[in-house]
Amino acid sequence: MEYDKILSDILGREDFLVVGKNVVRTDALDKALGKAMYTADYVPRGTTLLKVYRSTVPHARIKSVDTAEALELPGVEAIYTGADVTGNNQIGYALPDQPFLNDEKVHYIGDPVALVCARDEYALEKAFQKISVEYEELPAMLDIDVSLSEDAVDIHEGGNIALTTRIRKGDAEKGFSEADVEVEETYWSPYQDHMYIETEAAYAVPEHGKVTVICNGQSPFLVREKVAHVLGWSLNQVRIIQALAGGAFGGKDDQGPLVSAYAAFAATKLGKPVALVWDRPESVSYSNKRFPARIKYRSGATEEGKVTAVEVDITLECGAYANRSPFWLWRQTAHAAGPYEVDNCSVDGRAVYTNKVYGGSFRGFGDLALHFAAETQMERLAYELSMDPIEFRLRNVLKVGSRTTCDQVLDHSVGLEQCLKAVRDASDWSSHREPVWEGSKVRGYGVGLAYHGISTSRSTPDWSAASILLNQDGSLTYRTGIVEIGQGSPFGHIKIVSEIIGVPPENIRIELPDTDSTLNAKPTHGSRGLMLGGTAAAKAALTLRENMVACASELFEVPYERIALVEGRAYDKEDPETSVSVRELAEEMYNRGYDPGAYGYFKAPKRFFDPETGLGVNYSVYTFAATVGEVEVDTETGETSVIRVWPAMDCGKAIDPLMIEGQIEGSISQGMGFALMENMELKDGLVINPGFKDYIVPSSMDTPQIEPCIIVEEPYRHGAFGAKGVGEPAIISVVPTITSAIHHATGLWFNTIPVRPWTMHKALKEAEP
């Protein structure tokens, strides 16, 4: 029976068994009871500890590194510098600009200079005090404009611009000539730290000609690649076991390879196991952040409410290294017009080096800052036209047949209009068009939209893979390189497998990703974990199902088409009494020579873009979201509280609605933090608020009333059951919704976030007549 026919039969069911239903996750109890194992839990007592010795100046040439006195201290086992690297002293992600251990020059406060191995924390701290580094300090470029100035000192060879991007669609100036109103503003969004509960960690064990690393990254195969590169080894000499991750949000996608490479390098040099577990100040001060961005935005629209042109200029602050900036900046460029059809778009972007902690992957991946600017522009245009903000958006919103900023035609799976109308109706938007005062407090309503391309950026090849083994007792073992970081993607995979082969999810064990036994599923980022990973799981399940059905057909002596697999049993559709359990069927498969194992591989449809114009098919598909929110501003204290939120999302197909709700609820909290609270404070390049005491994140007390998520299902034709990604898109509309509601309540526009109480209080005072 052909793949498409099997899939069609399964998708044609009137009611799914587990897909689309809330099912308790198989890992939930262990996590709730504290039994789940995270990286540090694998480290035996007495293991050699590793700590990274870092630069204390933002920009300097290294003249000398003296470790002699530190090496004489009791408990200190080894100290390694760049001179000890015999493989490749380079670990840059997109560009070769990031040394593994800096031996010539440092680029920010926190740049790695040496690795110190000792028997305990006390010895590590003593060693740090005795290491002496002589620097020849250079001018520090601590601002993007300073870094771009004519007399700027180059941070890296070749200048301070890491890369540029552009899109030219239509004729922007012609579009502006047709506009009746124009709005031109500049927006700024700052650093944001991931603040995951579990900090970065790795535990490395050397073997003869091989090293095994247990770590908490987001892509075990990328970790393997970087570790092998630094060591100068082949990939098959490096084994990466991915532990459960206590939060990641993109940060561990970037830091996982670095931390693992440090541990593996030290362990292989020392010839014994080594553990590296960052403390909170180290994590907050030196790990990559959300890239700061300045976005200059010009928009034009007709008096009928049609956007005619946008001109967008993006300056992304890389920090010390480019890291993921080529992919981040390109995503911002490709989404620059927002989730609207605009015929004329002119977009320019540049990523700029500064001597500060570098940026990197973070939930929303570029689109959070971009949508804050784009949505605020739409809000301003609506007010200039005296038009309802939702009605104005509906006149421009992307629909089936629309063309995106990069001229990609959306031929299906576009549910944004439905999302927007749904939150409009659910929130009773039309009845709340005037601010409501109660004493010194005023409430207002706001709206925000989002779209986010699902898959890797810059049209890089994207695929995923998975494997399933049916054991002789009827239990199943599932393996994927997609990582469990709290979002539940691997559990979504086994729900897909369960639906296809008719075995309950609790009978399917998800193994931790292990590069020695797991297929490369590529990274867990870009909200691709369920869409691509789940589709690979579906292909593996369909192959296994075919073998299971063939065996049952032979066993029952009935045609293939009469076999059903439901609730752990195989039976004859025309004679349901003729049945066997999956346990019995598995034994028969082994005895009769039917393959009990299956692999699934899925490659996303080809994407491309013209490097001159930026036009092309940039992403496989897009997830869409709309949010309405109510805020309350205390005009005496300046404090802003989010009171109520109505979210909606077109996720293609909700494999598990409860998991989607969880992603949306977490995104609302994280988005609130970015809009109202969180800001990394730096002084002369040094992070001065490296912990929960001074870096404020939302607590449960700040959580608003979140109305049930409105799920719109416009299936993606290439995804298993039509599912699309959720985790990253969920946060993107939250920030502009809050700033929109603030404007509705107070009449104040904010082009810079976060809007903290003192910022609001000052703005209110300045607005007084």
Image (cartoon, helix red, strand yellow):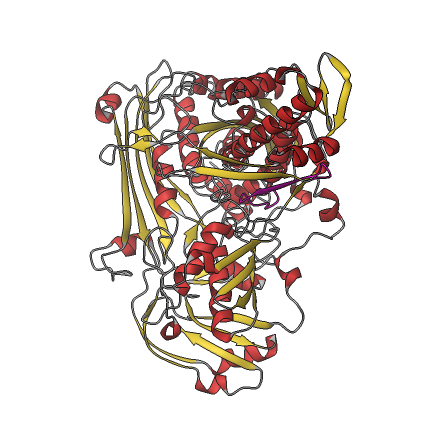
Q: Which residues are magenta?
A: 472-486
Tell me where residue 603 appears, x and y as whole percent.
43, 33
Q: Nearer the viewer, residue 93 or 601?
A: 601
Residue 646 shows up from this direction? no
Furthest residue toward right: 577
Image position of 367 with respect to 2: above or below: below
Tell me where residue 89 appears, x and y as whole percent.
36, 65
Residue drawn at x 53%, y 60% is 283
Furthest residue toward left: 150
Image position of 372 with respect to 258: above or below: above
189 to the left or right of 595: left
Tell me where residue 535 appears, x and y as whole percent.
52, 31
Residue drawn at x 62%, y 15% is 561
Image position of 309 with respect to 494: above or below: above
Q: Nearer the viewer, residue 607 or 750?
A: 607
Q: Quadrant of residue 173?
A: top left
Q: Quadrant of residue 713?
A: top right
Tell me where residue 689 appears, x and y as whole percent.
53, 60
Q: Nearer the viewer, residue 452 or 300?
A: 452
Residue 596 shows up from this direction? yes
Q: How many marks?
A: 0
